[in-house]
Image (cartoon, grey):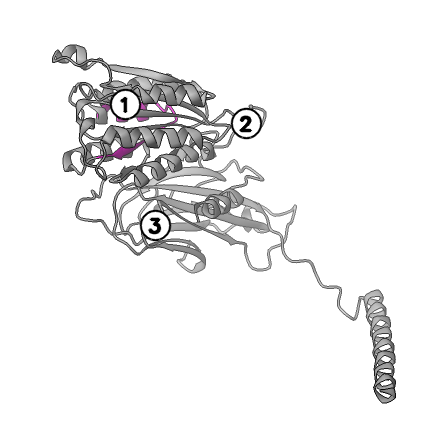
Amino acid sequence: MMTRRRATAVLLGLLAALSPLGISPAAADETTPKEPPKVELVLDVSGSMRANDIEGRSRISVAQQAFNDVVDALPGETQLGIRVLGATYPGDDKAVGCRDTQQIVPVGPVDKDRAKAAIATLRPTGFTPVGLALRAAAKDLGTGETTRRIVLITDGEDTCAPPDPCEVARELAAQGTHLVVDTLGLAPDEKVRRQLVCISSATGGSYTSAQSAEELTGRLKQLVDRAKDTYAQTPALVKGSEDCAKAPLLSPGVYTDRERFEEHRWYRVPVRSGQELRASASIALDRPVNRNYGVLLRATAADGRELVRGTDAGSGRTDVLSTGLRWAPPGAAPSPNASASAADAGGVCLVISNSFSARTTAGQSPGMPVELTIDVVAASPAPDSPGLGRGWLLLIVLTVAGLLTGVLAGWLTRWWVATWREN
């Protein structure tokens, strides 16, 4: 299902022509070589990971198995690193224990045997300096134009603040480091959940609670695999309005916003005569929500008339919901003489709506991550039919074909009758 949604989003997001109107699009320079996907796994190896409460196994053994499976299934183009925290200092000196974080696998092409050997040596030991580990992981991944991912796996909240891990996440996001932090919680603790949701929300990432080996392995593989699907440049930040009249004017590009439960976010796109609008919207389910939900993307005229809509719905078995639409003015045809005066003075309005509802433990703020892809290309109406009045060649071909078919059918019928009578 996700492969289909990410493909629809790519098709609708092809940028054939960039318009100078509105906000500058987030498009990659075609002359710049594409950077490889980069992701670092940050694993909590503090003393609490000794607990045997995941299907009768210790939390650390389940995490080690999941890491091994991820390393074995790693896409060839993805560069992976592994950092641990609380793995080496067994003492009680908090000042020492709260500096306990190391990178055991450097970010780069992975030697799978060496990586799994390093994972096998891990033993639950000390404190939980999550904030310090996140800062170090960001440095491990370096800088660049490609969005990079950190996946934090922990069973407890930070025991070493400052720095507070949520503040560290906000700090990294504010620096524009093209960094996304996804979090995985291994313990059903509300304080831990709130901290991990805060970390992921600050960077546009996702939070998941993993209560079994299968859930942890599946989610880790999904997040690592997602690293190769990130854009070469971070989508441009935009804030949709509560109605069309106040909506920001957008040119072709990729944008990111946040939308609260059951909210409507409006945007405007100039579409001239002879052009076609293509748009897609995706909403990430970065927190627990009730089952049976949907996302709606509509294009409307400035006066409120609905032009076209796209919808998608889910039942709780996916983490992203996507839909798209295409629209061109009736009778539109490519015209080199199309001018600004041919455009709708108010532009075409796009509105993203959702029918999510929160579980009792899910916070409303910040809103759900939204990604909006916009393209405006030359309209491509279906080619004219030649018609019988003008297509004399086609008419002759059809007549000859009909005569030959009749002759052949008659001959075969006579042959069959003659054969039947002889028998």
Write down the quadrant of residue 148 in the picture: top left
- Range covered by the magenta-colored residues: 167-186
How crowded pointer 3 is (Cα within 10 Å; few <14, some 14-19, many 20+) is rated as few
Q: Quadrant of the C terminus?
A: bottom right
Judged from the image, the secondary structure of the residue bearing numbered disc 2 is: loop
Write down the quadrant of residue 113 in the picture: top left
Position of 139 with respect to 361 (left or right) is: right
Position of 384 with respect to 199 (left or right) is: right
Q: Are marks 2 and 3 in contact (CB under 8 Å)?
A: no
Q: CA distance from mark 2 to mark 3?
A: 36 Å
Instruction: Please name the amino acid that badge 2 sits on.
Output: Asp
Q: Looking at the image, can residue 143 be seen?
A: no
Q: Disc 3 or disc 1, which is closer to the eye?
A: 3
Check disc 3 and report the residue beneath it. 317
| First along the sequence among labels 2 and 3 | 2
Above or below, 342 relative to 10: below
How crowded pointer 1 is (Cα within 10 Å; few <14, some 14-19, many 20+) is rated as some
Q: Nearer the viewer, residue 55 or 410?
A: 55
How crowded pointer 2 is (Cα within 10 Å; few <14, some 14-19, many 20+) is rated as few
Does 78 lie within the magenta span? no
Q: Are marks 1 and 2 in contact (CB under 8 Å)?
A: no
Check disc 1 and report the residue beneath it. 171
In the rendered image, the residue lying farthest to the left is 92
Check disc 2 and report the residue beneath it. 29
Q: Residue at x 33, y 34 (%)?
A: 204
| First along the sequence among labels 1 and 2 | 2
